[in-house]
Image (cartoon, grey):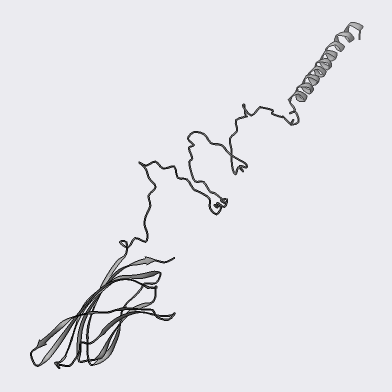
Amino acid sequence: MTSETIRKSVLPVAAGIAFIGAVGTFTSNSVQGALPSPPQNVLVQNPATQPVPTIATGTTAVNGTVGVSGPVTVSGSIDVGSMPAVSLSPGALVNLGNSPTSPVPVQDVDNPANQPFSTAVRLEIGNGEIFEGQILSAPTGKTLVVEHVSGEMTIGGAAQSDLKPAVVALTMSQVGLPNSLYHTVLPTFLGTALLVGNEKEDSYSFSQPMRFYVEGGRTLSYQVAFENPVEKCFCVLSLSGYLVNRP
C-alpha cells in the first residue's frame, strides 16, 4: 500500500472521529443547559402603599384591626367560630343616633291594655253566716292584678219589725303559700222591700277600686260573711284588671 493510499484511508476515519467528538460535546453541553436551577428565596419589599396583590384560598386567619371602606360583596356562607364578649360597665351610657323622623321603636310590655281581663261570679247562697268559693287562678308566669270590684246582692227572709239589716263583708283572698292575703269590700245598704208572703228583701251594692295582686299558680277566692244567719242571698260579683308577665 502506497503512502497516498494510506493517507486517503486515514483521512475519512479521522474526520468521522472528529465529527463524533463534536456531536458528543454539543449534546453534553445541551443536556447540561436544560437542567433546572435550585429554588431561590425571594424577599419582596413593597411598601404598604403598594402591597402585592394576593388571593386568599382555603382558611385564612385575620388578626388585629381590619379596616373596610366601601361596599363589600360576599358570596356563599360565612362561619364565625367565636364572638368576643360584649359588656357595658355599670352606669355606662348608650347613645342612639336615630333621627326624629326615624325613632327607635319601643313597646310598653306592661301596659294594662295588652292583657286585660274581666270576669263575673253569680252566687245563690242561704242558711248560714259565711260562704266561700273560688273565682279564678292566675296563669303560671304571670301576675293577676285586680283593679276594680263591683256588684250587688239581695238578702231575703221573714219580715220582722225589729230585725236590723245584716252587715255584709265581701272578702277576696289569695289562696296559696305564703299565708293568704285579704282585701275587704263593704257593701252599702240600699233599702228593704216587702214581698208577698210576709217576706222582706234587703238590697246592697258595692263598687270599689283596688290594687290586689295574685301571683301565678295561685287562686283568687271570695268570702261573703253576714252578721246574722240569712235564709237566702243572691249576689253578682264583677272583677276587672289585667295580667303582667313575670320573668
Spot occupied by residue 196 in the image (x, y as percentages of width and height): 7, 90
Q: Is residue 237 left or right of residue 32?
A: left
Spot occupied by residue 234 in the image (x, y as percentages of width and height): 19, 84
Looking at the figure, which quarter contains the N terminus?
Answer: top right
User: Is 191 rendered above or below residue 13?
Assistant: below
Viewer-side residue, 227 vs 73: 227
Spot occupied by residue 98 in the image (x, y as percentages of width and height): 41, 43
Query: In the current view of this chain or complex, which residue is farthest to the top?
Result: 4
Looking at the rendered structure, the number of numbered marks drawn on it comes to 0
Q: Is residue 204 left or right of residue 15?
A: left
Residue placed at 79% from the left, 23% from the top?
28
**Quarter of the image holding residue 45?**
top right
Viewer-side residue, 216 vs 52: 216
Residue placed at 37% from the left, 43% from the top?
102
Q: Is residue 134 left or right of residue 151?
A: right
Query: In the current view of this chain or complex, which residue is farthest to the front?
Result: 162
Query: In the current view of this chain or complex, which residue is farthest to the left?
Result: 196
User: Is 94 rendered above or below residue 31?
Assistant: below
User: Is 247 rendered above or below residue 203?
Assistant: above
Spot occupied by residue 159 in the image (x, y as percentages of width and height): 14, 92
Looking at the figure, which quarter contains the C terminus?
Answer: bottom left
**Quarter of the image holding residue 189?**
bottom left
Residue placed at 38% from the left, 52% from the top?
106
**Quarter of the image holding residue 135?**
bottom left
User: Is 56 rendered above or below residue 157?
Assistant: above
